[in-house]
Image (cartoon, rainbow, N blue to C red):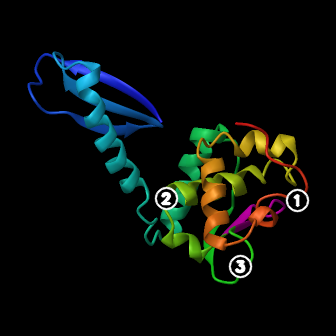
Amino acid sequence: MEVRIERSDRRVRTVSASMIDDVMIVKAPARMTDAELIPFITKLRTRLERRAMRPALTLEAQDLEKRAAALNVRYLGGKLRPRSVRWVTNQGARWGSCTPSTGDIRLSHVLRDYPVWVLDAVIVHELAHLQVFGHGPAFWALANRYPLTERARGFLIAKSGRDDEASWSDDDAPADP
């Protein structure tokens, strides 16, 4: 995780942190040294990681489509046009699926209980299928634009208790992000 420290003469004692994009922004007093900041950064990083691990909650269909639209703009240039993005309960072996000819994206309801960053990785993965069929290098070049794709893959493999390559790729390993 990238950490950016912003020092202020107005801050006297407190240190705070927030996530902007994929960067942890630490606000600290100007007089505090980097060595003094290390324990604060460690504690705040743990807190922010725990917050990111909270479940996706129950995003309704409309919210799910808005989330997909925002991810599309942020990571895929906003050029992809899904017709629908919805939860389904009949996907036992897949986290998501996409029908490029119709633009329909279906996400397993199981993802509702997982961290938001995992859901986002699956959404970006399925959005990428609107542009590239299959799981070759061109596909992974798009899907890996979401910075936590590999971490989400590891999370999903751990949750499934098996090597879950089948739900993420056909025959090609993902390219390095």
Residue range (magenta)? 96-106
Q: Is residue 84 above or below residue 121?
A: below
* Residue that numbered label 1 is attached to: 170
* Residue that numbered label 3 is attached to: 91
- Tell me, yes or no, whether the two marked residues, 1 and 3, touch with CB atoms within 8 Å: no
- Along the horizontal axis of the image, is 56 left or right of 35? right
Which badge, 1 or 3, is on the more N-terminal residue? 3
Q: State the quadrant of the C terminus.
A: top right
Marks 1 and 3, how far apart at CA: 17 Å
Looking at the rendered structure, the kind of residue marked 2 is: Val
Tell me the residue at 44%/59% (across/down): 53
Which of 74/1 is in front?
1
Mark 3 Cα within 10 Å, few/some/many (few <14, many 20+)?
A: some
Q: Secondary structure at mark 2?
A: helix
Tell me the residue at 14%/33% (across/down): 14
Marks 2 and 1, how far apart at CA: 25 Å
Q: Secondary structure at mark 1?
A: loop
